[in-house]
Image (cartoon, rainbow, N blue to C red):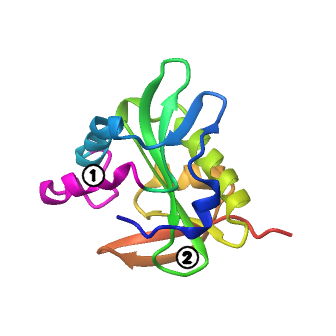
Amino acid sequence: MTADPKWLHPHWPTELSAPRLLLRPVETADSQLLRTLWTDPEVRRFLGGPVPADRLDRRLADAASQRGHFTVVLTKASQAVGRVTLDPDHRAAGRAEVSYEFLPAYTGRGYAAEAVGTALHWGAQVAPDHQLIAVTQAANTRSRRLLERLGLLDTEHFVEYGQSQVLYTTAPSK
């Protein structure tokens, strides 16, 4: 369970619309989607591997209560295809980290860019005093390209969880 971001309280729950997507708060009915996202080796390739069974049930039990955690739904098909989160960054105060996971069948179609871009725009509105960041493994070239296309800047390299990581930040406001 992540820290409860107090800065989200006045803005939660909320739904966000994108051209092809709806980002809505995670619901208990999303448990199968989450179970798949958290146990699929392809989805979890750059996220530390599948979530172990002994932690999975706890994560599922807490999922619907997390502020800033969205299920990504295709609007035309009403199909849940992934998730996007905005959480306090555990590495530094005053930062909010966006993260995302999508079912493999829905990658490469621009959904992640659309969803993450929408979440970043919303995050800038609801947490103007927070720097928005994203972190990905250096080896995750697809994620790195996506973050760069969204205008995030490669600002720091470090090792975390035994892997080389890249921290991206939104451009400083002028």
The residue that label 1 is drawn on is 61
**Part of the protein shown in magenta:** 42-65
At x 64%, y 55%, the residue is 11
Q: Which residue is drawn at 56% across and 81% down?
A: 93
* In the depicted structure, whether residue 59 falls above or below residue 7: above
Q: Nearer the viewer, mark 2 or mark 1?
A: 1
| Residue carrying label 2 | 156
Task: Give amino acid for label 1.
Answer: Ala
The answer to whether residue 140 is seen in the rendering is yes
Name the side, left or right, on which 108 lies relative to 121.
Answer: left
Residue furthest right as drawn: 174
Local secondary structure at mark 2: strand
Q: What element carries label 1?
A: helix
Q: Which mark is residue 37?
A: none
Question: Badge 2 local density, few (<14 within 10 Å), some, or many (20+)?
Answer: few
Residue at the (64%, 45%) spot, across then down = 118
Q: Check disc 2 and give the amino acid type.
A: Glu
Residue appearing at x 35%, y 51% in the figure: 63
Taking 59 as reference, is 132 above or below it? below
Image vertical order of residue 168 relative to residue 100, above or below: below
Q: In this view, does 75 lie to the left or right of 150?
A: left
Location of residue 167 in the rendering, given as x and y in whole percent from the top left corner: 53, 70
Label 1: how many residues lie within 10 Å, few (<14), some (14-19) or many (20+)? few
Q: Disc 2 versus disc 1: distance between alpha carbons?
A: 34 Å
Quadrant of the drawing holding the N terminus: bottom left
Picture coordinates of residue 123 (x, y %)? Answer: 65, 57
